[in-house]
Image: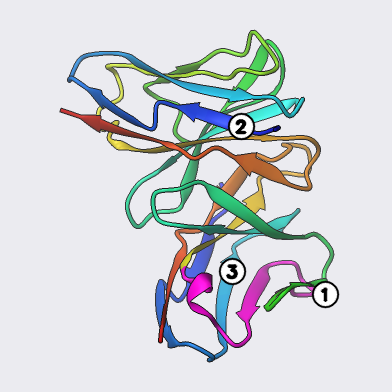
């Protein structure tokens, strides 16, 4: 079945560590996106990529990095420079502008 | 960046009652998207509106975009417990930024028996 998969579902990070969140899609979508959601808040755009080997910063890119080497994959690295990384992270993919498919999310907690 | 205000922030309704959620933008909307989210899960696409005055319905949910394309409403008729969740509106940043969206803070809906 086609879909978008995020892993892991839960992730714990020690302060000062980098962690990478995985996002894979088999929908043949060109565009992929990373959002962050905090309690009581809507989603905020971190990075997005409309084509392989190209990506743009969203509103809150500081402390994050991404790569888009393959169409199917758009991993997000939360670096130690991100001062408040505890949040729910959502990945999405789309073709055109009609509809996007979202993954089930990764909940990152700093311990 | 574009600001989206959703109201109300939370809503508790009795099963069978109608309800409306509003989403207001500070700028003209290129596309307005409505999503539903169950707590701790991903988003489920409901509807997308692009044209001023456009209205779409799916089952008991109707969404409208005003003529000026700066306000949208989501109306649920005869609410059911399955409608409970967080409703989010999202808007395209520009006309050519694909699906990169700004989102409102969401409206939390609880439907009581």
Across and down, in percent, residue A77 comes to: 42, 17
- Which of the two discs, 3 and 2, sits closer to the camera? 2
Label 2 resides on the chain identified as A
Label 2: element kind: strand
Q: Which mark is residue B53?
A: 1
Label 1 resides on the chain identified as B
Q: Which residue is mark 2?
A: A4
- Crowd class of label 1 (few under 14; some 14 to 19; many from 20; radius 10 Å): few
Q: Are marks 3 and 2 on the same chain?
A: no
Across and down, in percent, residue A105 comes to: 45, 38
- Crowd class of label 2 (few under 14; some 14 to 19; many from 20; radius 10 Å): some
Label 3 resides on the chain identified as B
Disc 3 to disc 1, C-alpha distance: 15 Å
Quadrant of the image occupied by residue A9: top left
Of residues A68 and A44, the one nearer the viewer is A68
Disc 3 to disc 2, C-alpha distance: 30 Å
Q: Which residue is mark 3?
A: B24
Q: Residue at x 54, y 53 (%)?
A: B103
Q: Residue at x 24, y 26 (%)?
A: A12
Q: Which residues fall within the magenta stretch?
A: B64-84
- Which of the two discs, 2 and 1, sits closer to the camera? 2
């Amino acid at each position: 079945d086609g879909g978008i998969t995020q892993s892991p579902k839960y992730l714990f990070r020690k302060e000062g560590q980098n962690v990478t969140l995985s996002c894979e899609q088999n929908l043949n979508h060109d565009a992929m996106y990373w959002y962050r959601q905090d309690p009581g808040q809507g989603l905020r755009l971190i990075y997005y990529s409309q084509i392989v080997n190209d990506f743009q910063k969203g509103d809150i890119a500081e402390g994050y990095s991404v790569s888009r080497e393959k169409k199917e994959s758009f991993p997000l690295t939360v670096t130690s420079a991100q001062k408040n990384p505890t949040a729910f992270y959502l990945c999405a993919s789309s073709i055109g502008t009609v509809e996007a498919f979202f993954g089930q999310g990764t909940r990152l907690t700093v311990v | 960046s574009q600001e989206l205000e959703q109201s109300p922030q939370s809503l508790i309704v009795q099963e069978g009652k109608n309800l409306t959620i509003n989403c207001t933008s500070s700028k003209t909307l290129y596309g307005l998207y409505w999503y539903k989210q169950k707590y701790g899960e991903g988003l489920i696409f409901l509807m997308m509106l692009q044209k001023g005055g456009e209205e779409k319905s799916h089952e008991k949910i109707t969404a409208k975009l005003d003529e000026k394309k700066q306000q949208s409403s989501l109306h649920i008729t005869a609410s059911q417990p399955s409608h409970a969740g967080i409703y989010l509106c999202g808007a395209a940043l520009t006309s050519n930024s694909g699906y990169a969206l700004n989102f409102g803070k969401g409206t939390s809906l609880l439907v009581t028996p």
